[in-house]
Amino acid sequence: MTQHDLPTPSPTTLPARLSDADRDRVIEVLREGAAQGRLSQDTFFRRMELAFEASGRDELDALTADLPQESRLSRIVFGTVARASSFTARVRRAWFLERLPKLLMPEPGPYPLRIGRDPANGLRLNDDTVSRVHAELSRDGALWVLCDLGSTNGTWVNSRRVTGRTVVRAGDQVTFGSIAFRLAAR
């Protein structure tokens, strides 16, 4: 028998290696099952461990076999609805922001713009939610800085409360008590 007469071994097909995305999909199904009360906390954690240790697709499938799966169509529909909902929220926020009165940033000078109810302030806001001396806007080099001066109802920039000083830019939404503005450059 010559070397050419030996049977050639058939190539063995190895199972495809699991990707992180495969594991993430299974873990998401497990999370949803736990949130719906279909899995106990112990079962959820044990199956997560098994998902990380799994070496084949069949092992991953076994972890979620007793849990309901969303169809592809459901995922597409729910994903589309979620994107549309977030779009309308962004449009509503942009519409609200454009309708706010503009607060022009002052010319840079040696003194900051004081904001509050007191008539001596550079910007007087006659509203009960605004403190007498509420905040100040000043220039620090090339940056504009807004500082809350210990106001009762707070100073907010883009829906985040200012504690101390924060950098602001044209287009930011600033709120003093319940009075809101959109900052604008000169």
Image: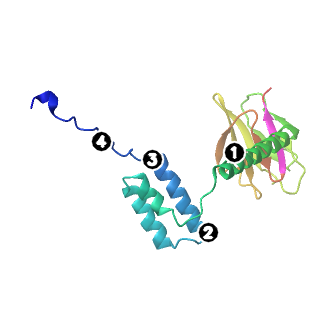
Q: Where is residue 53? Give x, y as percent.
A: 36, 57
Q: Which residue is mark 3?
A: 20
Task: Identify the amino acid type marked 1.
Answer: Cys
Q: Label 1 neighbourhood size at 10 Å, few (<14), some (14-19), many (20+)?
A: some
Question: Which label sits in the foreground, 2 or 1?
Answer: 2
Label placed on residue 147: 1
Q: Which residues are magenta?
A: 179-184
Q: Residue furthest left?
A: 1
Task: Identify the amino acid type marked 3.
Answer: Asp
Q: Label 4 neighbourhood size at 10 Å, few (<14), some (14-19), many (20+)?
A: few
Q: Where is residue 167? Give x, y as percent.
A: 66, 38
Residue 137 in sight from this viewpoint: yes
Q: Is residue 57 left or right of residue 138?
A: left
Counting residues from the N terminus, which is met first, the one under dot 1 or under dot 3?
3
Identify the residue at horizontal 65%, vertical 45% (top origin).
Answer: 165
Helix, strand or loop for disc 4: loop
Task: Identify the amino acid type marked 4.
Answer: Thr
Q: Which residue is mark 2?
A: 36
Q: Label 2 neighbourhood size at 10 Å, few (<14), some (14-19), many (20+)?
A: few
